[in-house]
Amino acid sequence: MMEPNKDIWVFGDYRNYFRNRVTLQILARATELAARTGGEVCAVVFGHQVDEFVSEYRAHGAGRVYVLDDPALKQYSIETYTFLMCRLVEEFKPETLLVGATQFGKEIAPRIAKKLGTGLTADCIDLAVDEQGRLVQTAPSFGGNLIARIITPNHWPQMAIIRPGTFQELPHDYDAQGEIVPLVLPRDLPADKIRCVTSEHRPSRKRKIEDADIVIAGGRGMGSKGKFKKLFELAELMQGEVGATRPVVYANWIGHDALVGQAGKHIKPKILFSFGISGAIQHTAAITNADFIVAVNKNPNATMMKMADVAIVADANQACLGIIRALKERIRV
Ligand SMILES: Cc1cc2nc3c(=O)[nH]c(=O)nc-3n(C[C@H](O)[C@H](O)[C@H](O)COP(=O)(O)OP(=O)(O)OC[C@H]3O[C@@H](n4cnc5c(N)ncnc54)[C@H](O)[C@@H]3O)c2cc1C
């Protein structure tokens, strides 16, 4: 296979654009890396009527934007997008491909890496270039206990997924003159195995959990989806946000954007309430910046109870209902 060129590609993830600027943040760091390696920073955009995003990427550091704009791409399809990205990488041979750690990015990047037979570092918190011009991908590992620096010396592209908020986006450059490369949809697109029957727009949460001063987090110890719902009432009374552990998210008691932990959000509330949570490292690694923790658990020896400033040995539901009652009483007075 031919040697790659030095270009750094950034996957143009524009879903939730106004809330999540991770693509722009990656473009900024890619610009710094390219200054050392000598490559071009390129954004790659798929979709339909995507001019607005193409302009944004140019204005935020992309020296070239590859655009595949076609009505057939209006609806996101994991198979089609994976196929297209692999095809383009094989054709243009960028040395590096960077993807934001959005739900979308986390879904597509491993598929691309697998199909291209290359490595992928997930959840990077830094990117640098070593003496030989190789991409050094820094990521937490072993539940956040170690920070690993990873290189991909034998395969290409060098691929990494980067957490939102890791880098600062560049200021908007109104005079940016990046090249736009329109591409044509290949004729041999694979037939989709998945057909989207209907889609529903879920309005975004009022406030992001990672910015909340008060977080009410619930775990499996809440018992059921119905009981877990009480946490929303408590959060409403306290003007806080509800967070959750992975089993709770997997059980569909709450959406993925409430997941606190290694695979979800890092939070830094002034007060964190933790109901029925054991305190696994994958969860607690993301709450170390909480100022004050109140934990409720029927097991006094749970790790979460040992981490807490106030540990209440009680049934999580009963405690939650008790606090709700007390708050309502106070509001009435
Ligand atoms: C690669 C990987 C990534 C992961 N990423 C994450 C992540 O991002 N976030 C995350 O949260 N997890 C993550 N996990 C899962 C993690 O290891 C734990 O399994 C999970 O955090 C446990 O969730 P839990 O505390 O709700 O459940 P459990 O561990 O089952 O704990 C339930 C707790 O509730 C208590 N309890 C039970 N009944 C009651 C009651 N009636 N009243 C009061 N207390 C009660 C129990 O004593 C127990 O302490 C990850 C795992 C892996 C392998």
Image (spheres, rainbow, N blue to C red):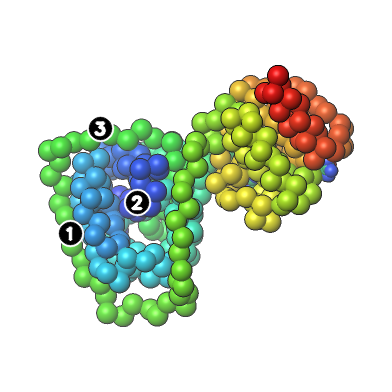
Q: Which three-letter amino acid code belongs to the residue tagged 2?
A: Tyr
Percent across and percent down for residue 182 are 18, 62
Disc 3 under 8 Å from ligand 1? The reply is no
SS for tag 2?
Answer: loop
- The picture places residue 184, in percent across and down from the top left corner, at 21, 70
Q: Residue 4: x and y, percent?
A: 30, 58
* 220 and 165: which is toward the camera: 220
Q: Which residue is mark 2?
A: 14
Query: Hey, which residue is sitting farthest top in the picture?
Result: 333
Q: Quadrant of the C terminus?
A: top right
Q: Could you tell me the amino acid type at mark 3?
A: Pro
Q: What residue would you read off at disc 1?
A: 181
Q: Is residue 93 left or right of residue 300?
A: left
Tag 3 or tag 2, which sits nearer the N-term? Answer: 2
- Above/below status of 123 relative to 314: below
**Marked residue nearer the N-terminal end (2 or 1):** 2
- Determine crowd level at label 3: few under 14, some 14-19, many 20+ residues with C-alpha closer than 10 A: few
Q: Residue at x 26, y 50 (%)?
A: 53
Label disc, if present, on residue 171 of the rendered structure: 3
> Which numbered marker is on residue 333?
none
x then y, percent, for residue 69: 24, 64
Res. 316 visible in picture: no
Q: Residue 200, relative to residue 18: is it above or below?
A: below
The answer to whether one can see residue 27 in this image is yes
Question: Which of labels 1 and 3 is toward the front?
Answer: 3
Does the beta carbon of the residue at mark 2 sit less than 8 Å from ligand 1?
no
Answer with mark 1 or mark 3, whichever residue precedes in sequence: 3
Q: Nearer the viewer, mark 2 or mark 3?
A: 2
